[in-house]
Image (tube, coloured by chain):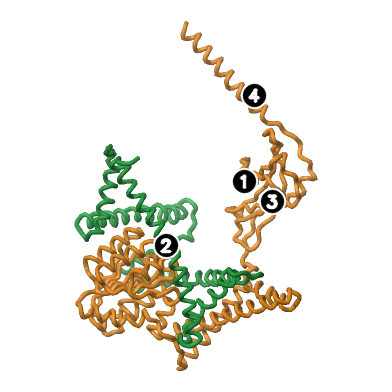
Amino acid sequence: MKSKILFFIFILLSFFFIFSQNLTQTDQKLFTPVDSTVLKNFIVRDVGNDDGTRIEVFCNFPFDGKNFTLKLYRKESGDSNFKMLKTIKSFPFKIVDEGLFSDKKYEYYISFVDSMGGESEKCIINQPISPKPDLFKTDKTILLLMIIIYTVVIILLVESVRKGKELFVRKISGLDTLDEAVGRATEMGRPVLYVPGSSTMSDIATIASLNILGPVAKKIAEYETKLIVPNRDPIVMTVAKEVVKESYSEAGRPDAYNDNDIFFLTDSQFGYAAAVSGIMTREKPATNLLLGMFWAESLIMAEAGNTTGAIQIAGTDAVTQLPFFITSCDYTIIGEELYAASAYLSREPLLLGTLKAQDYFKGLIIIILTLYFLILIISLITGGNITILKNIMEFLRFIFKS
Amino acid sequence: MALSSNFWIWIAAILTLAIYSFLYKDNPFYKFAEYLLVGISIGYGISVYWHNTIITKVFNPLVYDKNFLVLIPLLLGLLMFSRFFKNVAYLSRIPIAFVVGAGTGLSVPSSFEFLFKQVYATMPTKLDIGIIIIVIGVISTLIYFFFSLEHKGFVGRVSRVGITFIMVAFGAAFGYTIMARVSLFIGRIQFLLSDWLGIIK
């Protein structure tokens, strides 16, 4: 009997608790009507020049947001769930809603929250809208034109080199020592270690590194020295194998090629660094070539190589890692010199033509920047009154703004 | 001093010391830690590739969503295995060519965009000493990376200014990164002295 009474009390208390909760929830919904003219100030539209994943919501009306805040919600058409996007406290505002799908329709709602915390009803501010994907980014037209011009210049230069035109490339100190470095390894009877960086095949520095690996492997094959190429990426390893195999064949020494000398270590950044450091101390290569893209592991490898007394030539386009190579390696190939290196070593018309095209564009940029700077100085001296100078400056800025 | 009773903290501490032992010279403890790191990272990498690529990007779309487009990258991936068979080994060049071509093609517009942004940022609308330094630094550095002219005479002098700018930037980057590395080292020492040995709190 006692237990039944206790159970009855428990049921009563439970009802009271649930009921009081519902009452509280109902009390909190203090709906206040929103003026429909206010809603016209909110604009929802698709963001152009994108892949159909963005919609922007903005309001240019200067509301006084001191006494209220605004909550912006999004709802997929046909769905009942609202997602709160942002609480807006200052006006006018502009929000770009990202990560949407072009095959779905979205509705946006707003509600006002007063200083007491009371929230108005959610009011729809747009017709259901889908973000549209664009095939062409119209704001990148100038960029496309520049790429086309650049490509045409490359083709013309490559053709002229093929027809026998000599193109001058200045000395790059780090590369001139490659022969010496490989020769040293041969004399000492020790291997050459070639690290093609820690990045994947989609990285320009890795492609440049594998371009350099070709002539280097050819030289190594001629000297009959052992070449070790540890890799962090399986696809880079496969390409490296192809490159080295071809170079050995070109050097007339396909028999000297050992498939096991080009191997995969691990794709863990520091695991790779630890393993390369281990190879450096155990195999004691006479020459370490660290060429490609590197991150934080650069100093670990370069320092380990330095302690073994190997001659080290390093090169990367990673600006943050170059200081470490400069301090711990004998020769450093800085930034763009890495891209120039493959053309410099192989003297292939295609690579030389590309290198020359790069130079011409660099020259063009130097001329444009110098011209812009001179015009700016004249414009400032004359108080900015010469319209033509202003227009030229604006035109130049417009080109590079895209 | 209160030594940690947590088994995994002991493992982490011993492996930390094993890796640091390389500072003295190569030794069996370092070798053990190195092989362990390489082995575990490969095993972990395979499981990540299995779940995040094979299951999520191939199996699920193919079996549940009936998205047969994934068969194309799957076939390209399988062609990589042709390297194990000498007669058809040349087929592995197809996915390699695809990856290299796609990577290079994608990097062309992004490289141009990056270049444009840099040039635009070097086009000021007003002048002060900072802007003058930036413009001189950019032009002289560009001249240093100009490969069609010998670094002699005027070009040589300007490129020397360029390499000076580069070295100043590298010096700053070096100091900044070393500070970050020292902070990492402090973190490890704190782990050893606090979490493991309990000497400091």
The numbered mark 4 sits on a residue in which chain? A
The numbered mark 3 sits on a residue in which chain? A
Q: Secondary structure at mark 2?
A: helix
Instruction: Give the total of numbered labels.
Output: 4
Q: Are marks 3 and 2 in contact (CB under 8 Å)?
A: no
Q: Secondary structure at mark 1?
A: strand
List the residue tagged with mark 2. Answer: B175
Position in image of residue A37 (x %, y %): 80, 45
Q: CA distance from mark 2 to mark 1?
A: 41 Å
Position in image of residue B75 (x %, y %): 41, 64
Bin the neighbour count of mark 4 within 10 Å (Cα to Cα): few under 14, some 14-19, many 20 and up. few
Q: Colour of chain A?
A: orange
List the residue tagged with mark 4. Answer: A23
Residue B8 visible (yes or no): no
Residue A200, located in which quarter of the rendered image? bottom left
Q: Colour of chain B?
A: green
The residue under the point 40% across, 63% down is A295
List the residue tagged with mark 1. Answer: A85
Q: CA distance from mark 3 to mark 1?
A: 13 Å
Task: In the displayed orientation, state which residue is furthest to the right.
Answer: A37
List the residue tagged with mark 3. Answer: A93
Above or below, comparing residue B182 to residue A20 in the picture? below
